[in-house]
Structure formats: C-alpha cells, structure tokens
Image: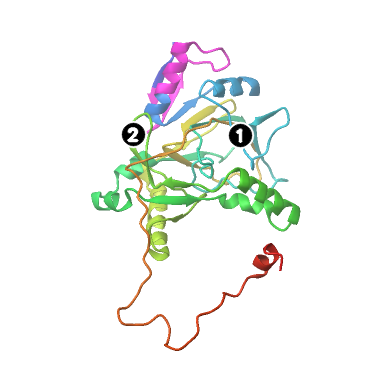
Amino acid sequence: MYEISRLGPVFGAEVHGMDLGSELSGEQFAFVREALITHEVLKLKDQNITAEQQLAFGRRFGKLLVSPFSPNADEAPELIVLDTHRHGRKPLTDIWHSDETYRPEPPFVTILRACIVPELGGDTMFASMRAAYERLSDRMKTLISGLTAYHDFGRFDQLFSGDADRRKMLHEVELALPHPNHPVVRLHPETGRKVLFVNRHFTTRINELPDDEGRAILEFLLGRTGVAETQLRVSWEPNTVVLWDNRSVQHYAPYDYYPQRRRMERVTVAGAAPLADIESCSVAVPRMEVEGVPDQPPGLPEPASSPARPFERQGSGR
C-alpha cells in the first residue's frame, strides 16, 4: 500500500510503498500525478529501476523532450546523463532555473534519478514560485501583472564559444528554437494558481519596461528564490527518484561535492505554452520629446542613409 508524507511546510512530499519498476495501474499513476500537482515536488526512495523503466514512466505524463544542450545516452536521446566528476567540466546547473524555459512550450515535469551520489553534498534545492508569488505585496502583484519577459539559452551559450563550427551549430539551434517571450506571471494550467515565471538562467529582460526599470524589477523577482520560507532541500541516495512540476518550481544543484562523483539521469516531459495571469498587453516605451525643440537645427539636409555595419554590407552584396 502506498502513502504520502510531507517534506516541508510549504511544498514537497515523499511517496512510500510505490515501485516505479512495475507497470503502474491507472489508479496508481493518477495518485502520483495528483500528488505532483498538489505538492509540486515528489521524492520516491529505493527505486531500483532501469533507464528504460524511467523513460516508460516519463511517457505516462506525455511526450519526452530531447535537450539540444545536455549530454544524453547514445541509445536513448530522451535520457539526459549528468555525470560530474573530477575529470569533467564544471556543471552549468548551479544556478536557479526552471528547465528549458528557452522553449516556446517549456516542460511540464522533470524526472531525475540518482545513480551515483557523493558521500557529502550534492543535494538539490527547490523553490516554489507559486509560494514566491503569493508572498509579494499587492502593489507588486499589480505592477508585474500582464508583463512578459524574454528567455534565451543563458549559460548554454558557453558550450559554443571560441569555435566557428560551434557557433554555427548554435545558430541552427536558435532557428529551431526561437527565443520566446513568456508571461512574468503565469497561470498554472491545472490549479489556476498564479506562479512567478522568471529565472536567473534563461530570463534576460522584461519587455514592457525601460531597461533600467526592467533590470531592477527583474533582479528583485529573481531574488525571490533566495527566500528560505519558499525553499526545499532534497538529499539523495542511490536509486532515489525525484520529480517536480517545472511549471511552478525552480531548482538549483549546488556544486559543493567536488571532487566527488555525482551521476544523475533525467527525463523531461513536454509542456504547453504558459498562460498569462491576464491577457498580456504590450506597452510601447515612447520616445522622449520636448515641446518646442526641433529634431535638428534648421537648414541642415536630411541624411541620405545611415552608415552600414560590416555584416550589413555583406548581406546586401556590397
């Protein structure tokens, strides 16, 4: 018989007595899915399952995604393999983020399985962005309602630096995944709760505000992950599986275990385009004009054309 216990006062729960290696009945899977939506992060210990079983479990939630940036298994491109050790490069996950918000349709659920864990360190931290939004003042909620933010590839750009062929590969990925604009506050599609949907890895600007105002507001919102009351820290043992609702939580994997080894395997399930908290409105920033001041001194001729940049000249055949 399976049961559930809370991991924290705000969110997170552990499921007991369920074997993900067996084919879950419709009732069992419905229990897991409902628990995920309710608690946002679920932990299941002692899950001695194979990669194939993990993939099969993920497919119960929906279509599996293939990451263009993360290392994956040769035989299963949907399986991300995060193997960190003294001889490898520093991981790019030690920053608060929601998975793959550079997609027009960011993921629904992420399923992470621990294969090798360090003796000390290697926890994963989570922040409920539903709780983060609820802690904002009414004045701040009004200010950010209806705003949108631009998401790009963030740190993953580093994977393509210093090599012309790699930059070309990045351009091809950008064509396949054009950088999206997502609502700063999204509606959770199943609970209807409002969620703060900006993250430090992928969100670069707020579109409807001037740069200086946008940077200040965005930095404030990004800092909400640092509020201890909205956080949860999950410790790992081999064969532990953790799944989280990527639509309402962010996570951070501290790189505090070097030079120990940490190997995790991840499956990511496709989601849908985020719904705005209200119908998004685009506010144009007007050009500042002073009454009575002409654009230029009288008598000067209008410029025939603006000077072109080198790449613009190349593109025009000149």
Label 1 SS:
loop
Three-letter amino acid code of the residue under disc 1: Val
Q: Which residues are magenta?
A: 5-34
Position in image of residue 283 (x %, y %): 35, 56
- Of residues 275 and 185, the one drawn nearer to the viewer in this rendering: 275
Q: Is residue 258 visible?
A: no
Residue 160 falls within the magenta-colored stretch: no
Q: Which residue is mark 1?
A: 117
Of label 2 and label 1, which has the lower sequence position?
2
Going by the image, does 243 lie left or right of 226?
right
Q: Is residue 181 above or below residue 63?
A: below
What residue is disc 2 on?
A: 9
Residue at 57 percent of width and 45 percent of height: 93
Amino acid residing under circle 2: Pro
Residue 176, percent from left and from top: 62, 43
Task: State left or right for residue 223 relative to residue 63.
Answer: left
Residue 113's image quarter? top right
Residue 20 in the magenta stretch? The answer is yes
Question: Disc 2 and disc 1: Cα gap in Å?
Answer: 26 Å
Taking the image as drawn, is residue 147 in sight? yes
